[in-house]
Image: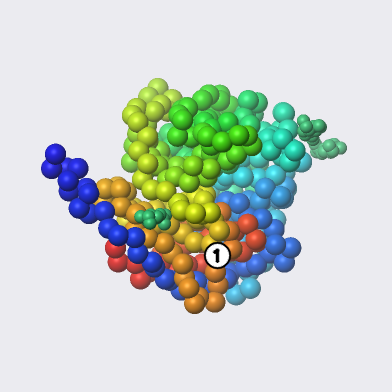
Amino acid sequence: MLFPLLLSLVVCTAASFTFPTRLVFQSPTGLFLENLAVRPNGKLLITSPLSTTLHTLDPTVENPTFDEVYTFPNVTLFGIAEVQPDVYGIIAFMVNATTVSAVPGTLAIWRVDLSSGGPPVVNKAADVPDGVFLDGLSTVPGDPDLVLAADTIAGLVWQINLRTGVVRVAAQDEAFAAGAPAPAFGINGLHVRGGDLYFTNSQKKTFSRVPISVRGGNVGQTGPVQVLGSANGTNTFDDFAFDAEGRVWVATASNTFTLFFPPAQGNGMLGQLNAPGNPVEFDSPTSAAFGRGGVAQQHTLYVTTMTGQLIAVDTTGIHV
Ligand SMILES: *[C@@H]1O[C@H](CO)[C@@H](O)[C@H](O)[C@H]1NC(C)=O
Ligand SMILES: *[C@@H]1O[C@H](CO)[C@@H](O)[C@H](O)[C@H]1NC(C)=O
Ligand SMILES: *[C@@H]1O[C@H](CO)[C@@H](O)[C@H](O)[C@H]1NC(C)=O
């Protein structure tokens, strides 16, 4: 009984954090920005569910431009994850806005290889014919061939082998389902860390984790889902990023971030990032990723929003 008691003692009261924020880029058309990956060279790769083009932006220069990396045939872009150094998996499909699902035959995971330094080498790694609406994408530490994709409408997690093209359901749990009449968005962002799959569920407003194992090239759920926190009111959780200390920064629509510290500190929700008084405020944040390069970059959280903002948050001041 000592262990649970200790956990309950370290759960702290929710606090409010304010950090310097800077608008790095604003899409002139207000393009909905969905997800991002940070390249080893520090440049960002950015997807949009309303664009067939994968874009790049250098967040370290004044007035960065939003440049084309590659334009896909008739499909728009969702989750992106770096599967090997400077090689990315990307979810792409044609959205049927009426049914809020992928047009049959269009849903696939593509592989974008930028590691040569030359033009991108792009190929379709796997079709996901039974996928409904894939959103977040995660790597699987220890198996560079595998990715996990959140099917937000079907409410399950797909496993895709980018080398063999084999697709299977890795996990199905009530905690992934929206639990509301379709179309509703359930599991959204997901990331594997330290033997757990962490995920958000938009409709249920939860941030949770579930233990998984990787055996024989397959991911499986090995225990019950643990809910780590919930969003209140009209807030909903989207994608999230781990920082170097293991804190989790969850993009929270409509205008904030929610901080958690699950691994080391029990289930503690640390608080919300409101940045009141900052010249820049988050307008419907969708995802976030920490910079790469020097120490300053590693403490910079890059945020995408539905309204076309790319915002840099200097998190150096966090001491919890
Ligand atoms: C894209 O979709 C349009 C309309 O459905 C079709 O005419 C065109 O051939 C498609 N292009 C490709 C490259 O699939
Ligand atoms: C989208 O779904 C509607 C309703 O089922 C259907 O009528 C329409 O043809 C679909 N559009 C595409 C592009 O598949
Ligand atoms: C939601 O509200 C409860 C009760 O006021 C609070 O304890 C919790 O921290 C809030 N969660 C978030 C994500 O703000």
Horizontal relation, residue 282 to residue 105: left or right: left
Residue at position x 59%, y 63% in the image: 283
Horizontal relation, residue 320 to residue 1: left or right: right
**Closest to the observer, 64 or 257:** 257
**Residue at the far front in the pictured view:** 233
**Percent x, y of residue 62:** 60, 75
- Above-or-below relation of 318 to 242: below
**Percent x, y of residue 132:** 63, 31
- Above-or-below relation of 96 to 51: above
Any part of residue 31 in sight = yes
Say which residue label 1 marks. 282
The local crowd at label 1, few if under 14, some if 14 to 19, many if 20 or more residues have their Cα within 10 Å, is many
Quadrant including the C terminus? bottom left
Residue at position x 58%, y 31% in the image: 154
Any part of residue 109 in sight = no
Say what secondary structure mark 1 lies in.
Answer: loop
